[in-house]
Image: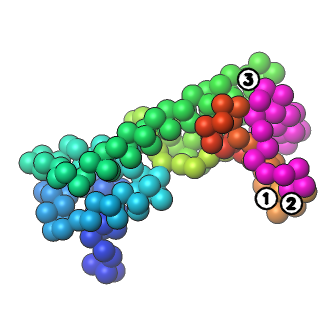
């Protein structure tokens, strides 16, 4: 099945799997890669940063000019991930002022516990697990400090009946960071 994938998908999957050797990656890169397509794919999968960081370390490979877009997109994504990390730390500090215990879920939890750097774990949002009796208090506290509901107020009932979290919140700085209180 791996062979049925286009070269860009094969390369992205191979980089995502631990232990990809420089020889394997160089062979895939030299086999013909559409860097514009690879950039779009990596952006969609939120994998620009880890992809570029790994490709930049491939021994004996010099990125062609057409790879510059991937490099630029990775730099922007890295900045966005740093902002995401900063917003997470700010939210955790805020919740700590009220002694609200938080367990990081999914991407955020893995980013701080498994990955060498927060920015190496692709994610779209941050998920916080809070004791049910304090979840609404935490959600309201975040709103009181500038976090905004990502969707219209009418969606609250929908989230309560169809999801395991309150409506998503976006960060006060307007950077597009999304936080979900579970």
Q: Is residue 144 depicted above or below 81 in this figure?
A: above
**In the figure, is residue 129 to the left or right of 160?**
left
Q: Earlier in the sequence, mark 3 or mark 2?
A: 3
Q: Are marks 3 and 2 in contact (CB under 8 Å)?
A: no
Q: Give the CA separation, mark 3 to mark 1.
A: 25 Å
**In the figure, is residue 29 to the left or right of 182?**
left
Q: Is residue 109 depicted above or below 6 in this figure?
A: above
Q: What stretch of residues is rendered in magenta?
A: 128-155
Q: Give the CA separation, mark 3 to mark 2.
A: 27 Å
Asked if residue 24 can be seen in this view, the reply is: no
SS under mark 3 = helix
SS under mark 1 = loop
Q: Residue at x 23, y 65 (%)?
A: 33
**In the figure, is residue 44 to the left or right of 134?**
left
Q: Are marks 2 and 1 in contact (CB under 8 Å)?
A: yes
Residue annotated with mark 2:
158
Residue annotated with mark 1:
163
Q: Residue 29 placed where, x, y %? A: 19, 61
């Amino acid at each position: 099945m791996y062979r049925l994938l286009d070269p860009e998908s094969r390369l992205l999957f191979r980089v995502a799997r631990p232990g990809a050797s420089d020889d394997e990656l160089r062979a895939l890169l030299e086999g013909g890669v559409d860097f514009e397509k690879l950039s779009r794919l990596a952006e969609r999968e939120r994998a620009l940063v880890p992809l570029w960081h790994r490709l930049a370390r491939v021994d004996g490979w010099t990125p062609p000019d057409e790879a510059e877009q991937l490099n630029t997109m990775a730099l922007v994504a890295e900045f966005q991930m740093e902002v995401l990390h900063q917003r997470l730390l700010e939210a955790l500090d805020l919740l700590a002022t009220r002694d609200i215990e938080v367990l990081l879920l999914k991407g955020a939890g893995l980013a701080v516990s498994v990955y060498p750097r927060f920015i190496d774990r692709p994610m779209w949002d941050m998920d916080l697990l809070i004791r049910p009796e304090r979840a609404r208090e935490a959600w309201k506290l975040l709103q009181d400090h500038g976090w905004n509901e990502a969707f219209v107020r009418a969606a609250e009932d929908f989230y309560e009946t169809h999801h395991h979290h309150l409506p998503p919140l976006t960060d006060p700085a307007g950077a597009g960071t999304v936080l979900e209180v579970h």
